[in-house]
Amino acid sequence: MKRRKIKVHNYLKLILVSFIVSLICALLAFSLKEITEITQQKIFSRVQSTNKWGFIILPTIGITAIYFLRKYLFQKRKNKGITEIYKTLDQRKDHLPFFKIPSHYLNGFLTVIFGGSTGIEVSTVVATATVGNEAYKKDFSAKMYKRELVCAGVVSGIAVLFSSPVAGWLFAIEVIARKFTKSLLLSCTASALLAWGVLSMTEHATILPFVISDWKWSALPFFVLLSLLGGALSVYFTMLVIHAKNLFGKITNNFIRVNLGALIVGVLIYLFPALYGDSYHGLSEIMNASSQNSNFPLVVLLSLALLKPVAASLTLGAGGDGGVFAPSIVAGAFLGLLFAILCNKVFGTQLLLLNFALVGAAATLSSSIYAPFTTLFLVCGLVPNGFVLFIPVLMAGLISKKFSQFLLPYNVYTYGNNLSKPSADC
């Protein structure tokens, strides 16, 4: 009886601390999301309207600033993304140091606003995980609940970024915890509820402003084929990240390492402005233009689908902070648009472009983060009524994940799995 009371007491403490962690992380994620979106758009609009040559130098400014912050403010301590979260969970004596909160917050912000072709998702994941780890270190709950508090922080961060508490909950369980227990259920659910409360009190719009009409079962074979292509695109992205890190890791001269990758990214942005930053705004514009113009150049969509992973890999290799969430969503959506337009032209089909953009995004993201159920809620939340595509998106996530695992050798898959989840050695 006494043991049961202690257990109940510990659960109540865990729920309370999870609420507190969630609130802190929700505010952290919300502030990073808002200031990044606003600043990114202002810088992009200013350069595009005045002198487009400025796109070439902007990524260098951001990544150079990160280099000096790392060297002088954070005392040359590196960020290694989600692999550090796994390490601190698997080895309880290792902790995420507090500096990772300001480090990832600032580095993610600087990377994206100056055009670095990633997103702030990994910055948010590691920063919020560190908040949970700090709560654990302060002995605010039982010693056994480190994983629970780290996951509580991550739930809130992802929930706010994508306006989906369910996606945050699934991501924490499916990707971070990699297991399911009663205590994880309590901490993650408490965090998701708190995040939902914060979201209900703030104004937030979906990442894409489009509305889905419907989908037909006759399109199912095309969805399957696109799922396979999305899995292949994810493998291509994973291999690019691996090779970029190996390449830049061999460059000992800091000036060359930072500027080589950043300048190439800048040139790519100059040629294709839609690659700027997280590219969500560019994706929205391309989707709108392609839906209004049946003769939209296919070579542009093909270039964007293939170059977004290149730009993201170079950004990470040069020292930018980020991961594969935004690049996978955007590249996959461009692939879906290309696929639908090509089928309509060649086979005379009437595939709906928006539907295939979202399924392409789901296929690529799922096989990049190895989390089809998280992907389901993330992608369906990109548009106001995305759950109309529940079945195609879920199917795409499951098929593409299995196909990408088939394409990659086991040892490369294992390494790529750690890289492809929202992480990067920064």
Image: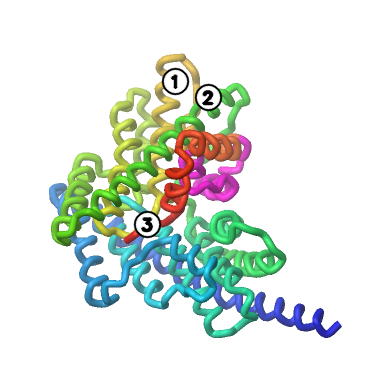
Mark 1 or 3, nearer chain start? 1
State the extent of the magenta-drawn residues as a range: 362-391
**Who's the residue at 50% across and 25% down the image?**
351
Q: Position of residue 103 (x, y in %)?
A: 34, 71
- The kind of residue tagged 1 is Cys
- Return the mark for residue 424: 3
Q: CA distance from mark 2 to mark 3?
A: 33 Å
Q: 144 or 373: which is nearer to us?
A: 144
Question: Farthest residue toward the front?
Answer: 411
- The kind of residue tagged 3 is Ala
Left or right: where 239 falls relative to 214: left
**Who's the residue at 15% across and 60% down the image?**
253
Q: Is residue 181 visible?
A: yes
**Who's the residue at 45% across and 46% down the image?**
208
Q: Position of residue 347 (x, y in %)?
A: 46, 14
Left or right: where 53 falls relative to 119: left
Q: CA distance from mark 1 to mark 3?
A: 36 Å
- Return the mark for residue 222: 2
- The kind of residue tagged 2 is Phe
- From what the image shows, is residue 30 above or below residue 214? below
Left or right: where 207 falls relative to 263: right
Residue 27 in the magenta stretch? The answer is: no
Q: 276 or 107: which is nearer to us?
A: 107
Q: Is residue 209 visible?
A: no
Residue corresponding to mark 1:
343
Q: Position of residue 254 (x, y in %)?
A: 17, 61
Q: Quadrant of residue 104?
A: bottom left
Q: Secondary structure at mark 1?
A: helix
Q: 209 or 425: which is nearer to us?
A: 425
Question: Farthest residue toward the top?
Answer: 347
